[in-house]
Amino acid sequence: MQFSQYSGPLIWAVAAATTFGVITRPFRLPEAFWAVAGALLLCVTGLLAVPDAMAAVARGYDVYLFLGGMMLVSELARKTGLFDHVAAVAVRQAGGSARRLFLLVYGFGTLVTVFMSNDATAVVLTPAVLAAARAAKVKHPLPYLYSCAFIANAASFVLPISNPANLVIFGAHMPSLMGWLARFTLPSLVAIVATFAALYWTQRDALRERIATDVPVPPLSLEARLTAAGIVVMGLVLLTASLLGADLGWPTCLAGVATLVLVCACRPGLCLPALREISWGVLPLVAGLFVLVAGLEQTGLIGKLAHVVQALSQQSPTAGVWVTGGTVALVSNVVNNLPAGLFASSALAASHASTQVTDAVLIGIDLGPNLSVTGSLATLLWLTALRREGHHIGALQFLRIGALVMPLALVPALATLLL
């Protein structure tokens, strides 16, 4: 396909319109509609060749498999009553204190994010937190719901498996687990603590209420126990795959399918309802974003980014950390951090960036999305989970919180790289 002088601006226009559609959801159409529409528009207008678009879709196969497995176990946990049980236990542990329940949710969300990924926090934890809020007769559920969204990104670089974007950034050059911990343990701790402090401050008034204490704990059925075992096994599989440097998609998907088979062997009537109610629209959303990235790559963006990163790495390491980390953090909110990670990975490889600059890019990609609802796939999954339960949080409503929480965590996290 011949690339004319007008192709670049047109591709950028399509990408901007698509991003606007994903953020604002005109006519109440889902995010996936606008992502797919933008991808199709690139192909129909000839701005992107169909084979190139198909190749871009294929690049995300590991992400699709990963999300599919996560959504399977999440839906099973909801259907079997596992979420209701966990929620009731959490409420009892809170002892009537909204602050304590908030701390429990944040702490549990940190563990889920670290050992199962930020997408798991959005998909698996959010419905459980909603169930806990209902059980506790909470008047202001937003602090607990925000906790799920913000910790999903804040704790997403403790381990390589904590965020699929980590795998995209490093690719075949993934550090060893001990090397990763040496580079990212301190920034991760800083990000987790700073995010908690900032989020607690913004929600302090809502957390003054008293919540119910006498909450009945529903018994765990055999199906719920099998689902819980499946989630634990999935976490172990993910950790093992990370240690071996293997892809995460197939292990996650196989663990999810195995859990579905075991649970439905005990309760066959659960299979079709569980499959039918999964938010499958997330998969075409991701595919559309990959196609948009392929279109933007044709505008020469990668080469320009590589030149800038190389110059910063060589001339001023300190400036390189602040400029690259801050820039990718903001860009992640424009195009989503998964496509931004693809751009950054190509630019880092082409520029032979320093370790400090590479680490700053990863922190920006993982932590920056706490600014807006479009920053990460985890936040979009979180929004989907909320809508299924009748809760709607607008882009501006989230931005008001994110504009405070994200910078207060990003700045000190990046600063640790200069120590």
Image: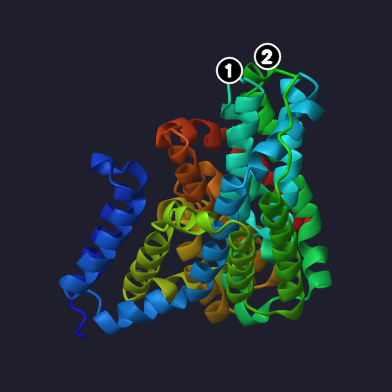
In this figure, which colouring scheme has been used for the structure?
rainbow
Disc 1 to disc 2, how far (Cα)?
8 Å
Decide which of 99, 332 is in the foreground and name it: 99
Residue 70 falls left or right of residue 302: right
Q: Is residue 26 above or below residue 223?
A: above
Residue 287 seen in the current view:
yes
Asked if marks 1 and 2 touch (Cβ < 8 Å), the reply is yes
Decide which of 317, 392 is in the foreground and name it: 392
Q: Is residue 72 above or below residue 215?
A: below
- Badge 1 marks a residue whose secondary structure is loop
In the rendered image, residue 259, in percent from the top left (x then y), is placed at 64, 64
The N terminus, quarter of image: bottom left
* Circle 2 residues within 10 Å: few <14, some 14–19, many ≥20: some
* Circle 1 residues within 10 Å: few <14, some 14–19, many ≥20: few
The residue pinned by badge 2 equals 209
In the rendered image, residue 118, in percent from the top left (x then y), is placed at 62, 54
Q: Residue furthest top?
A: 209
The residue pinned by badge 1 equals 139
For the residue marked with disc 2, what is the amino acid? Glu
